[in-house]
Image (spheres, helix red, strand yellow):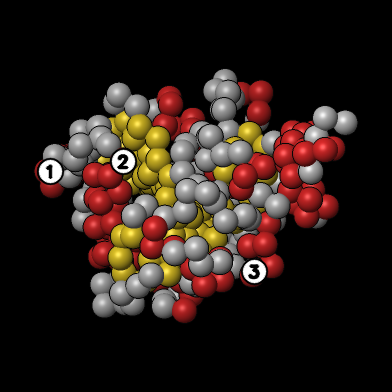
Amino acid sequence: MATLFETRKLGLPLMNLIRLEGLPILKQLHLEEELFRTSKDNWCIINDGTDDPTIVMGISGKPAELLDIKPVLHDEIPVIRRFTGGGTVIVDPGTIFATFICNKEAVPGLQPYPRPIMSWSSLIYEQVFQGIGNFRLCENDYAFGDRKFGGNAQSITKRRWIHHTSFLWDYDARNMSYLRLPKRAPEYRMARDHMEFICRLKDYLPRSTFINKTVEALGTHFSLESVVYEADKDPSAIKFMPTTRQLTREELEEALSATDLENCPAQYASL
């Protein structure tokens, strides 16, 4: 583990590294938001999988547009609205998460805007996937060729930015049916359905190899220091109130009702 003295000697900024396994995605997002809002340090969070299938939408996501709400309600799939932008994903034990939370000056010369941050992060994964597949940054996604395996979301403030990625290590094809084709899909998707648009990372390298290579690549830009996260922290001791939250069943039912009203014939719309 590098000391602060060694970090200064190397000329690399310090980054705290938290490695998790199976932390529920809501807890992970609460942790990310807390560190982003209240900490002055740089952080990397890697969470190897989550628990039950969960839908995560961006801060401005609308369930009626993005979800097939009836089966979501029937199967009791949790829906979370996170504090960052970006698209909608369904995550489960086959998803690997990697998040970078950085101060504005952490990466020399990096302009704190979405596209430069996206381009910089792709350099990390170019190191990870060197000689593996045909890795590309396609608009806001990570892909092999024209098939997506990583979706990204960001938030940027005056002094800090956060960039987090959901990697499709594996997925259950049935879960993809909960998601609608978004109105603002990337051009390279070319209206393909989910099964034609995405691919599994497990077809390219072992799970542990991907995680270890990510840490190794990040270590060429930062001096990493491992930090233990207390997942069972006493809730009464937590003063920060995150904005990331799970939508209630009532909210989803209201969205479904609004959708049904929009889709009904004109002669019944006023009834």
Asked if residue 174 can be seen in this view, the reply is yes
Q: Position of residue 270 (x, y in %)?
A: 82, 30
Give residue 172's mark: 3
Asked whether the residues under the numbered discs 1 and 2 touch, taking CB atoms below 8 Å apart as contact, a structural biologist would say: no
Q: Name the residue type under label 3.
A: Asp
Mark 3 neighbour class, 10 Å CA radius: few under 14, some 14 to 19, many 20 or more: few
Camera-nearest label, 1 or 2: 2
Q: Which residue is mark 1?
A: 11
Q: Position of residue 234 (x, y in %)?
A: 65, 30
Q: Which residue is mark 2?
A: 114
Q: Residue at horizontal 28%, vertical 33%?
A: 103
Q: Choose top left, top right, bottom left or bottom right for residue 49.
A: bottom right
In the image, 154 versus 100, the foreground residue is 154
Report how far apart the C-alphas of labels 3 and 1 lie in the structure.
Answer: 44 Å
Report how far apart the C-alphas of labels 3 and 2 lie in the structure.
Answer: 30 Å
Q: Secondary structure at mark 2?
A: helix
Asked if 60 appears above or below 226 in the picture, the reply is: above
